[in-house]
Image (cartoon, rainbow, N blue to C red):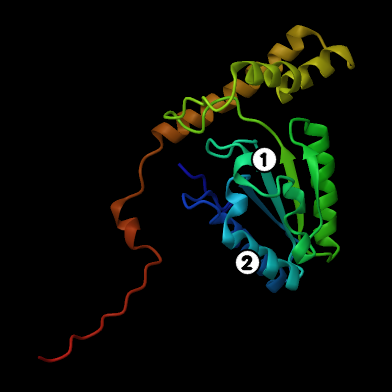
């Protein structure tokens, strides 16, 4: 369920809402401790933004000027509640102000804006300025899960977002309009991407489970003698 790759320095997701924020902050601390040029990119949503551990992390990151980029993916509805009903401050880029952490909003549906904001944030961290917040303004078309019918919004709203702001469709329009790419060339790229996704899904579904003996890997337990009766 949660992807993890030590080799790729991807430290996965976590079932506890907001739990990845202190972990990401700790990874930023390890980068400073080990004197590397690496930074930590820590993602969480508008729903998780109200968790207390988020602000404990903000405080430590600011105090120690840790190289961490906090990316708030604001899809407007968290698990199913509008931000206007759940958050007193709905501009999440301002959530770090009391900790002296700068932040700004980004059009998360525009790959160009995301790239530019990412470059700026990375430079901010690597220059020793400490943490920064990027609020990515985005949207999810489906429910939070299979059990979410998403009745808290209208179909017209979803369709409007799909037709006007969908990031993939907007890229296609720029490629065929501004850059003169043919429809066949775009379809070829689309097929290549779909093949990569299909291969990854096939590997995930058919890769063998770890050997049961791996349950004991890196596990330490001390044998404590029981007290005499």
Q: Quadrant of residue 205?
A: top left
Q: Residues within 10 Å of mark 1 (few under 14, many from 20)?
A: many
Residue 8 visible in image: no
Count of picture labels: 2
Q: Quadrant of the C terminus?
A: bottom left
Q: Is residue 89 above or below residue 35?
A: above
- Residue 38 located left or right of residue 124: left
SS for tag 2? Answer: helix
Q: Position of residue 158 (x, y in %)?
A: 63, 20
- Residue 38 located left or right of residue 82: right
50 and 2: which is toward the camera? 50
Q: Is residue 13 above or below residue 106?
A: below
SS for tag 1? Answer: strand
Residue 33 visible in image: yes
Q: Position of residue 190 (x, y in %)?
A: 67, 18
Pointer 2: what residue?
A: 56
Q: Quadrant of the N terminus?
A: top left
Q: CA distance from mark 2 to mark 1?
A: 20 Å
Q: Residues within 10 Å of mark 2 (few under 14, many from 20)?
A: few
Pointer 1: what residue?
A: 74
- Residue 144 located left or right of residue 68: left
Q: Are marks 2 and 1 in contact (CB under 8 Å)?
A: no
Q: Residue placed farthest to the left in the image?
A: 229
17 and 12: which is toward the camera? 17
């Amino acid at each position: 369920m949660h992807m993890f790759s030590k080799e790729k320095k991807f430290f996965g997701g976590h079932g506890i809402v907001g739990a990845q924020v202190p972990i990401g902050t700790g990874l930023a601390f390890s980068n400073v401790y080990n004197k590397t040029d690496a930074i930590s990119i820590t993602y969480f949503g508008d729903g998780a933004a109200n968790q207390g551990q988020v602000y404990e992390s903000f405080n430590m990151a600011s105090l120690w000027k840790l190289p961490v980029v906090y990316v708030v993916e604001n899809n407007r509805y968290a698990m199913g509640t509008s931000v206007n009903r759940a958050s007193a401050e709905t501009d999440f880029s301002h959530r770090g102000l009391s900790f002296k952490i700068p932040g700004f909003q980004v059009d998360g549906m525009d790959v160009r804006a995301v790239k530019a904001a990412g470059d700026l944030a990375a430079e901010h961290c690597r220059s020793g300025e400490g943490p920064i917040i990027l609020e990515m303004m985005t949207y999810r078309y489906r429910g939070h899960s299979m059990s979410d019918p998403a009745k808290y919004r209208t179909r017209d709203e979803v369709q409007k977002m799909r037709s006007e702001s969908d990031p993939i469709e907007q890229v296609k329009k720029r490629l065929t309009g501004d850059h003169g790419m043919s429809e066949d060339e775009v379809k070829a790229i689309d097929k290549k991407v779909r093949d990569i996704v299909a291969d990854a899904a096939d590997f995930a579904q058919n890769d063998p489970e770890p050997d049961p003996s791996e349950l004991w890997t890196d596990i330490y337990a001390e044998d404590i003698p029981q007290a005499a009766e």
